[in-house]
Image: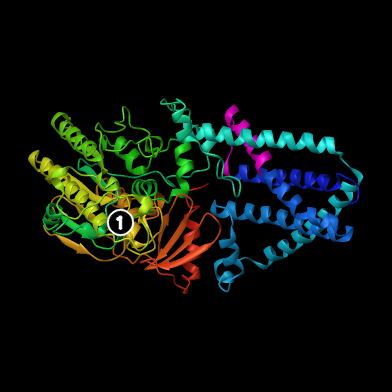
Amino acid sequence: MEKKGNLFTFVLINGLLWCLISVGFFKINGITLDFIGISFATLFLFSHIFTFAWIMGLLCLPFKYIAKPILNFACVFFGVLFSLFLLIDLFVFSQYRFHIGLAMLGLFFGPAGSEIFVFPVSMWLMTVGSIILLIGLEIGFLFLSRLISLNKKWILIFSAFWLLCFLSYNCFYAWGKFMMVPSIISQRKILPLAFPMSADRRLAKWGFKAKKDPYSIPKKGSLNYPINPMNCGVSNTNVLIITIDSLRADMLNTDVMPLVSNWAKQPGMTVFNNHISGGNGTETGIFSLFYSLPRTYWDDFTSLNLPPVLISKALEMGYKPAIFASADLRSPTFYRNVFAPIKDLRIGSKGNTSWERDINAVEDFEEFLKKRDLNMPFFGFIFLDAPHAYDYPPKDKIFTPAKELNYLLLTKSTDPTPYMNQYKNSVYFSDKLIDRLLNDLKKHNLLENTFIVITGDHSQEINDSHNNFWGHNGNFSDYQTKVPLIIYQPRKDNALQVDYLTSHNDIAPTIIQEVYKCSNPTSDYSIGYNLFNNTPRPFIILSGYEDKVIRAGNEIMVFDVFGSIQQYDNLYQPVNTPIDPNTIKEGFTVFRRFYK
């Protein structure tokens, strides 16, 4: 490859090949055929895939100055390697709807790989044949690149064109994400290693406002949810889900939550002592609570404005929605998925502080109870925020010394006591609001006919592991995922304590079966179990914004966004014992169950 431009020609030919291969990703996921969808997909495909081509070119470039045979070998080697990566990733995406990374490759080539990934002999033969074919193809590209020599002018023109497309694709996505354009956000995860630019805060600061009216739902989608039509009975039992942002499981005690602790002893109450959220953040926790699915499905449901069965079935059965959130439901964008079909949705609360907005949410729910149609059951969701902000009225400063968090001054050796006290005070305040809500129901004679859920969206670590974690979204230990769960069933005589492992993925199936009287197996619409089914869970699925997590007992395996695997126990201590290969294999199937 002695002529100037030949290496570029080789890169160009491979880039075009990879674009052709990558069309398969869009075929699997489904492409929206409106103008915006096609425009974004075209820019996304070309600019992102050619990024891989540039990387390959840079890897080959140093060999150009060593010797021609070595350069030729490097070109063929990297060409085959990148092409094979795309083909394997395309296969994985078709099976699991996520992309391979170092974690997946480590499992594949590890000692348990043959147990996790079981392929017939014919498939291995096809793989070997494909590698031989790719080698021959890359050698052919090598000879072709000698015949088509592009000069420096064409290199600069093409590079400028690619850069323009790359910037356009990122700006296009930033706008589409901010405006919640279904044709754009539904396609973000289609291609491997794609992390387009997001600029929500910047666009809002510049005065842009997200579109309030819903976009038309894309005609073509890849979801198969629910798998079968729902077959349900008739119900007039109210449903009320009370969720406290950042509520730790260990706060359910007579010191911090004395009122709720007393309620938990009443007939009809069941306390689940070993309950795990579906993630370590609000977005993942609430999504798992309502959908009984991991966050990996978020973009698909949001792009289609497709609500969970828990909500859609309630509306179909004539339930009156009663959604009273303290925090704004546009961030995260629950108004585009969980509560998408609810007309005149109450987006947020009034008040200058979290505790003031919490009180406003409770007051508005009380007004709803006074004015509601007595002939209609209601589906209520009350989302309180004070513990998330460590916020409370001055009169509720019970635990001292208490100190506001300044994250810039915190280290792993910082004494957590004053910050824990600050947090406890906020939970103590929330305890009184929950008691107020339950007494409101009692006042209106609704306890006899309301199924109640009391829980948190995720937990809140306050340097518990001494690794300088203060808050959530940092790891998947109990400190950030274990939350209290109390279920009240009307017309039950006993108060129960349950110690087996449960998760947020179990809440929606429980309501759907116990209240809606649906006969479908839970696998038709969820990845969870009925909470009162004490069958041991072989594993539970959690997720972060990008991380995928399989937890079996107290052993946790995290497949992070960078492609590595982290393994630790429930207290965030590293472990070396791998989770059973069959568990990993079965866990992976969860991430594709509700795709066509």
Indicate whether 55 appears above or below 555. above
Q: Is residue 174 left or right of residue 535?
A: right
Q: Quadrant of residue 433?
A: top left
Count of labels shown?
Answer: 1
> Where does the image place residue 387, in percent across and percent down from the top left?
26, 48
Q: Quadrant of residue 72?
A: bottom right
Q: Circle 1 sits in a helix, a strand or a loop, which is it?
A: loop
Q: Is residue 523 visible?
A: yes
Q: Nearer the viewer, residue 495 or 564?
A: 564
**Picture residue at 41% right of the left edge, 35% below the top:** 336
Q: Is residue 112 left or right of residue 254?
A: right
Q: Which region is colored magenta? A: 29-48
Kindly identify which residue carries mark 1.
530
The residue positioned farthest toward the front in the image shown? 409
Q: Is residue 495 left or right of residue 536?
A: left
Q: Nearer the viewer, residue 565 or 62?
A: 62
> Where does the image place residue 548, in percent across and percent down from the top left?
47, 56
Magenta part mainly helix, strand or loop?
Answer: helix
> Where does the image place residue 447, in percent across and percent down from the top left?
12, 45
Q: Is residue 214 left or right of residue 123?
A: left
**Picture residue at 60% right of the left edge, 63% below the top:** 105
Three-letter code for the amino acid on which mark 1 is drawn: Asn
Indicate whether 411 appears above or below 394. below
Q: Nearer the viewer, residue 333 or 247?
A: 247
Residue 205: in magenta span: no
Q: Residues within 10 Å of mark 1 (few under 14, many from 20)?
A: many
**Picture residue at 12% right of the left edge, 59% below the top:** 494
> Where does the image place residue 314, in percent across and percent down from the top left?
29, 39
**Figure coloring:** rainbow
